[in-house]
Amino acid sequence: MTTTMHREVTSGAPHPAALPRLLRGLRPEGGAVGLGEHLERWGALDLRWVRHHLQPELEDSGLRGHGGAAFPVAAKWRSVAAAGRRPTVILNGAEGEPASAKDALLLARTPHLVLDGAAAAAAALGAGRGVAYVPRHLSDALLAAVGARQRHGLDPVPVEVLEAPPGFISGQESAAVNGVQGRPAVPSFIEIRPIRERGVDGRPTLVHNAETLAHVALVARYGARWFRALGTERNPGTTLLTVSGRPGGPVVQEAAFGTPLREVLGLGPDATRSYQGALLGGYGGTWVTIDTLLGLDLSEDSARSSSATLGAGIVVLLGHDACPLAEVARVVRYMEGESAGQCGPCVHGLAALDEVLQGLAFARQSRANVEAIGELCALVEGRGACRHPDGVARFVTSACAVFASEVAAHLRSGPCRRVGAPSELPFRGRVLRRQGGVAARPR
Amino acid sequence: MRRALKMVVDPVSCAGEGLCAELFPERITLDPWGYPIVSDEPLTPQLMEHARRAVDMCPHLAIHVMDAPVRVPTPTRRGGDGPGPEPTRAEARIVAQLRGGGPRR
């Protein structure tokens, strides 16, 4: 779809090819960008323009959601708008994935860019209510930011700040809607009634994560043509990545879609000497070999061509000091504990997977049990109200493929010497210790 | 994408009673833990009577019949990703019955 009226790029716009965009001007160790500095850097949103022109402009921008599903943003807006009633806009800052830190970084460091995106969505869709659903450690600062905006009349509707409970699934779309309504923040079975049409209090509801809204804020300022100056035709713009496993600890970085991943990650052809595999897309994502990783571009399309996913923009590089099966077993135990416990196949299937993987990593497991892994994964796939079990199945099956020789070695001679090494994969707020050869329950 | 009538289990409501698999083994089997596995195959008019019984008898009202896209790509009259053929009159009547809008038997 094309529109006749393109956003004219204002003279204060950053060069369209310049990187970074979202992280522009953020000092590596600096604090939050206050409202004054924010307006100085980006200028104020023109809400009158936004009301009339942002929707078609977003359509042209090709922006997709940055929460993992890569769903076209304009299509989501269209169905929210078509539902007829005044919608609710939710800024979803509940980034439950322990290996992701980008939404928290945006909310902590450049909150007004994210809130601008929410304001733009609320103005363009005529929302009656705006909610920022964020974890506790971010809520006070965000409340102050919202207050400062109110004094300047920057938001078309007042934004309520609601606390998202911790946990892997509390940021899942329907779980966020439930949390905003004061119910337990667990997913609903929504095959029958999509959130976009009937969400909070039965109203059409737009849920976007912090990064998606920050991109919206840039499209609302500089337009689709500016936005498309970086990235590819199908995956325009830039994306944030949370990269961990490299020396120096986890970092959030921004790169243009389509950039070779080896370049983004700073990996040379000898990367296999440093790393034995990589996890893309987090704990509901997929393991890939380093060779596969080096051949990928930064885009969901490229990842999917290798049966992988970037998820919410997560890369974890696994060094050679770790036992991959111990890492996998710890994550599966964590994910089992993070299940909402609502759906039988997820409850029982993840418990069964947990048992087999604990045995494989830390004890001695029979070949028959290990061969059942594939069957268990197939049994849980597509059988929950949300995609939690599907993610675990994907995580486990890809691990078994990438680390097949490790599986064989553990079957042959029991746990390897590296199983005692501390966990390389991150667990937010949880320490998983081994006790007597089996990882302690994280509950 | 072609659309057809399919059975769907609401996994949150389902408590694994297993009645549905007994009433409708043509499309529903049970997993090792007693929860239903519903075939993705579309329902045929001949099977609708059984489907309706499974829907009605579930103590947790966890089973639904939905007009849903068929995941396996099948050739349609229009081809491509069009909305696919309309449900036949028999299918439409059955849906109406299932929604409680029509006479039951």
Image: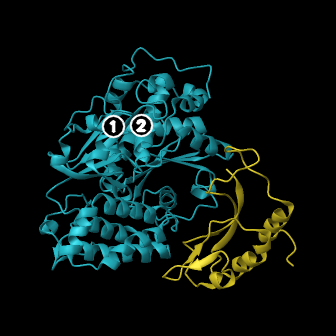
Chain colours: A cyan, B yellow
Q: Secondary structure at mark 2?
A: helix
Residue A8's place in the image compared with B34, above or below, is above
Give the camera-side residue of A3 and A295: A295
Residue at x-position 19% and y-position 47%: A272
Left or right of residue A130, residue A271 in this image: left
Give the camera-side residue of B10 and B67: B67
Give the camera-side residue of A261 and A188: A261
Q: CA distance from mark 2 to mark 1?
A: 9 Å
Residue A404 in the image, given as x and y percentages of width and height: 28, 63
Pointers 2 and 1 in contact (C-beta within 8 Å): yes
Callout 2: chain: A
Tell us which disc is closer to us: 2 or 1: 2
Can residue A228 be seen? Answer: yes
The dot on residue A214 is 2
Callout 1: chain: A
Residue at x-position 60% and y-position 19%: A5
Q: Secondary structure at mark 1?
A: loop
Residue A368 in the image, given as x and y percentages of width and height: 34, 79
Residue type pointed to by label 2: Ala
**Dot 2, how many residues are within 10 Å of its Cα: few (below 14), some (14-19), or many (20+)?**
many
Residue at x-position 32% and y-position 42%: A241
How many numbered dots are placed on residues in this image? 2
Disc on the earlier residue, 2 or 1: 1
Residue where numbered disc 1 is placed: A110
